[in-house]
Amino acid sequence: MLAYAARRTLLAAPTLLVLIVLCYVLMYFSPGGPFTAERPLPPQVLANIEAKYGLDKPLHAQIWDYVVAIVTRFDFGPSFVYKDRSVNEIIAQGFPVTLTYGSISFVAATLVGVSLGVLAAVRHNTLLDFIAVGATFSAQALPNFVMAPILVIVFTWQLGWLPGGGWSGGKWEYIVMPVIALSTSFMASIARITRSSMLEVLNSGFIRTARARGISPAAILWRHAMKPAMLPVVSYLGPVFVAMITGSVLVDLYFSTGGIGLSYVNAALNRDYAVMLGVTILYGSLTIAFNLLVDLLYAWLDPRIRY
Amino acid sequence: MIYGKARVERIADRIADDGFAKGRSLWRDAAGRFFRNRAATGALALLGFIIAFSTAGSLLAVWSNEEIDWNVLADISGAGQPSFANGHFFGVDSLGRDLFARTLQATRTSLAVGIIGASVAVFIGTFYGAVAGFAGGFLDNLMMRAVDVLIAVPSMFIVILLMVMFERSLVMLFVGIGVVSWLDMARIVRGQTLSLKNREFVEAAHATGVNWLGIVFRHIAPNLLGVVVVYATLLVPSIILVESFISFLGLGVQEPDTSLGSLISEGSSTIIFGTLWQFAAPIAFFLALIASLYFIGDGLRDALDPKDF
């Protein structure tokens, strides 16, 4: 287990490096940039600006500088568009917000999804099961960009219960709708996966043996069935994490929560490559870290898994 | 002296009698199973309707997708409502353009992105996975490690990077989404190839002197086809979702082109003015499209995966 963990951790570092290099190379070869305005700058001015940001050096030197700055000082450099702000400041301002509702959504989706799935599997072919299956099947087809406007129509315009956007320091009424919008479809997917894997486990031989030995249903569920049934769910958590990170961009934009997403979209519209790279790399490294966690969790749940 | 000779002869006669033991191919079996699945068949009909409607529906349209109807522009939430009298079957959008024509156009765009993106992904993924699986050894290891690395990268951000850095055109969208979506395909195909190439029937083909090209095309490829078809069908809706997401953010297709994502985005921002149809029309098409594709994919998986029985 320890050797596997070490090997798996070592794999994460080159992954991160590939991500950084890939993004930087894309930026380097893209035609046009943040400084190509509608009225072209005089070449000397452009050269001076590029020298200021270190963009006049050869590609490998630029990448080296960039990686060194990130690794040693955790510094993503200055924004190309906002003269007075660095990428770090933009991230530091928005990230706590995104992290708050993001982690609430992730925990909510996992907890509710798993409990719903287990409940449906235990009460297989009852009314409860049918309701759960129907609800999750339709909820799965509701991505966040459909959920968000529907929530605003219902809860803000029709009922007037919740504010349609804003953050105001993270009061609960501002968090509810972002969390629901972000987590609904994943909650449904997790519930479906849990239900089918739990059903498979509950019908397998060792559970029948446990029943025959007279173990109580609760003990069978928690001690015997839960661990193997969670395997497919755990491996699905990685993609959920990625999709939630992506979805947070939309939530930030739609609910004006002030998270990183808004800065990211503005950077994309203004061709502020420095901010785009910074956010992409930050989210990429979070993803890599989370995938590492999932793999270790998986190996702990199922000791047969070793690569 | 063979025991029960009469019976053997009777069976032989009946086998020789054509019409008795007509071979049923895997695909005919699968088609039978698929069409017995009512949800999947209904979804197929719905998808056919959407495709036909989005291509031929423009014949019904009174307005083009770019014309501005100046008569209703001043009072969009009133005069711009869906009506048959002025030819705006789905109403008009916030700029006074006919929403019927624009929804059809958006559905076409989304379908095209889904199908072309999925084709790109399937092509790259199948080729990559088959090569890795068939080659095995060091090359396989190297190629799959590369996939492991790339799969950890949040692909949506890469698509947006591509879209922003290179021109924001439809072509870039097709290619960008396809290029980041092939990884799962490669993994699936590689796994399938690996398990197939050591099977007895491949060994038998080897032993009877079939060359490797024949083995790949006659024995491996048909067995891969089921998985590829199922996965490709499920890939189309997920690519439409990605495209709609990017267009919702305003980073996708640009005017005068439109897609369901951008229409949903426009509709959701004008909801304050009481123009619910601007939101409802694209949403209805979007949900119908996604749901029918998912049902078809599910039905195909059940039909082509006989081990589920």
Image: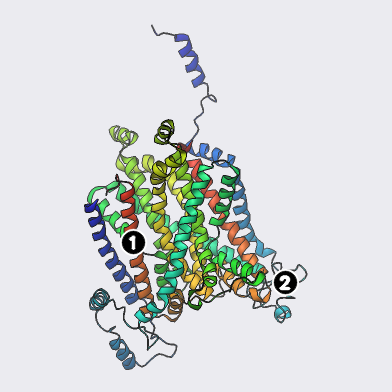
For label 2, the residue is B81
Q: Secondary structure at mark 2?
A: loop
Q: Residue at x 71, y 82 (%)?
A: B74
Task: Decide which of tag 1 and tag 2 comes sooner along the chain.
Answer: 2
Camera sees residue A49 = yes
The dot on residue A16 is none
Residue B248 spot, x, y in % from top left: 53, 70
Please check whether the numbered discs 1 and 2 fall on a single chain: yes
- In the picture, measured across the screen, residue A174 lies left or right of residue B103, that is left
The chain identifier of the residue carrying mark 1 reads: B
Q: Residues within 10 Å of mark 1 (few under 14, many from 20)?
A: some
Secondary structure beneath dot 1 equals helix
Which residue is label 1 attached to?
B150
Q: Quadrant of residue B63?
A: bottom right
- Measuring from the top left, give residue A51's x and y in whole percent: 28, 88
In which quarter of the view is residue B163 placed? bottom left
Give, as a three-letter code, the residue at label 2.
Gln
Q: Nearer the viewer, residue B291 or B8?
A: B291
Asked if residue B166 can be seen in this view, the reply is: no
For residue A83, above or below residue A255: below
Q: Position of residue A302 (x, y in %)?
A: 33, 46
Residue appearing at x 45%, y 45% in the figure: A197
Amino acid on which disc 1 is placed? Leu
* Residue closest to the eye, A204 or A32: A204
